[in-house]
Image (cartoon, grey):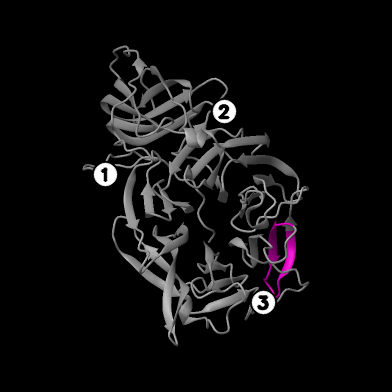
Amino acid sequence: MNEPPLSAPWGRIHPRPGPTRHALGLALPLLALFAACDSHTPVEIDEVRIRSAQVVEPGGPIFRNLHLRLNAPAAVEVEYWTAGAPRLRIRSDAPADSHVVPLARLYAGRTYEYVARAIAVDGSSGPPFTGQFTTGPLPADLSAISFTATGTLDIPLVLLHLYVPGEFGGYVAVDGSGNVVWYYRTVDLPFGIARRANGNFIAMDKGRGLLELTPAGEVLHELPQDETDRNQHHDAITTPRNTVLFIALDWREYDGRRIAGEAIWEWEPGTSAAVKRWSAHDFFDPAVDRTEQSTDDDWLHANSLAIGPRGNILLSMRRLNQVISIAPDWSTIEWRLGGPGATIPFADGDRFTGQHTAVEVAPGRILLFDNRHELGGYSRAVEYDISDGVARTVWEWRPARDNFAFAVSSARRLANGNTLVGFGMSPGLNGSTGPIEVYEVSPDGEVLWHLVVDGPFVMYRAEPLQTIAGETVVTQ
């Protein structure tokens, strides 16, 4: 099974009681009443109807929630729009007499119109309730980053992991025109984000820990960073059990030397329970399974996790130039691709080095971003067929103007067969050529969309994002 996409159906958001505060880098409570809308009183009818509405800011200039109160329990549907942007629709199907509807995917500095309707059980709708609201400007450090897009993006949004030391760090969603439509500010490096079945995000903040976020950026649950015993450092993915897997350093002593290996932990949000499921120390020998890149404080440098079609776990280890498959029950290593001790050889010698985002896109087909950090010259996206026990290159792509990204970066296969490829290193950084850029490319290598990001130090990944809060584009 592939890692679930960053999309999920939206449901009614219930504010948490108590003092929890954190929304997209601003210390504002989720339900702080702000920027009340100008609205009209609906005409009285004997049907279900909206009695009042208020737009509030849950914690940032481009975040708005619409509070609706009805005369009887019903579902609600809201459409909202501004000039030069898609008309968007969001719906809450759970009958209630009060709804909090996130108005997601907003542009900064715009005035929006909206129309809301109550939807009865029989499908009939009440009279329209209209109003408007205005968004604010982006924070200065985020607006200092430029996003230049060309072509046509075939997915709604792209979620970028950006870091500018001392300035903006966090997750930023952009649309096909390069407009910022969502963001979450982190304390430290943004090292992995995923989606739970309830529509909330799971985000890794290297300096803070793992966070479960609502689409409006409220922190619901947190697994704090533990740099001594469980230093969370790369990736977070969700499982079919709705839990979270993540990578953490795992120290063990060998003949008086402490060596940092890797462990995979599982966390159930809503609890403080985190369980170590797997340790590299139980399967690898630091005296044998190593390269010249290996050091005692960073022996393997695991940098990505993915769930395979059989429930197997793929782990990428940059220091070994190796991807492994761990059995679903965590008991054995099924195969090792690349690097020392490989069980799957390369048929044509076309090896990868320094790789990121390895995933089994179909049984026996491995897609990854090949940094080629030991080979230089250029980086690429590459897919191997390993179904017969030998790795054969079946697809690769690199831009017409070579881009060498020494580290970070990503390759993600989309549902339509295209691939989203992100080069994440700025020019001159560890010999990288830059720029930081993202491409959507077709299976035959045609560039369909291109985004250049100017300003960040690094872009850890570029991920496809279908929706922020369940909103869809109105096509008619």
Q: Residue at x 76, y 74 (%)?
A: 347
Residue found at the very far bottom of the displayed protein: 255
**Front residue of 68 and 379:** 379
Above or below: residue 302 compared with residue 182: below
Query: Quadrant location of the C terminus?
Result: top right
Q: Name the residue tied to disc 1.
A: 20
- Point out the stretch of residues depicted in magenta: 378-395
Numbered badge on residue 376: none
Q: Which residue is mark 3?
A: 344
Q: Is 17 in the magenta?
A: no
Q: Nearer the viewer, residue 225 or 85?
A: 225
Above or below: residue 99 compared with residue 344: above
- Mark 1 and mark 3 lie on one chain; the one further toward the N terminus is 1
The kind of secondary structure element at disc 2 is: loop
Secondary structure found at label 1: loop
Q: Position of residue 107 (x, y in %)?
A: 50, 28
Q: Are marks 1 and 2 in contact (CB under 8 Å)?
A: no
Amino acid type, mark 1: Thr
Q: Is residue 447 left or right of residue 213?
A: right
Q: x, y percentage for residue 141?
A: 49, 36
* Contact? badges 2 and 3 (CB < 8 Å): no
Determine the secondary structure under disc 3.
Answer: loop
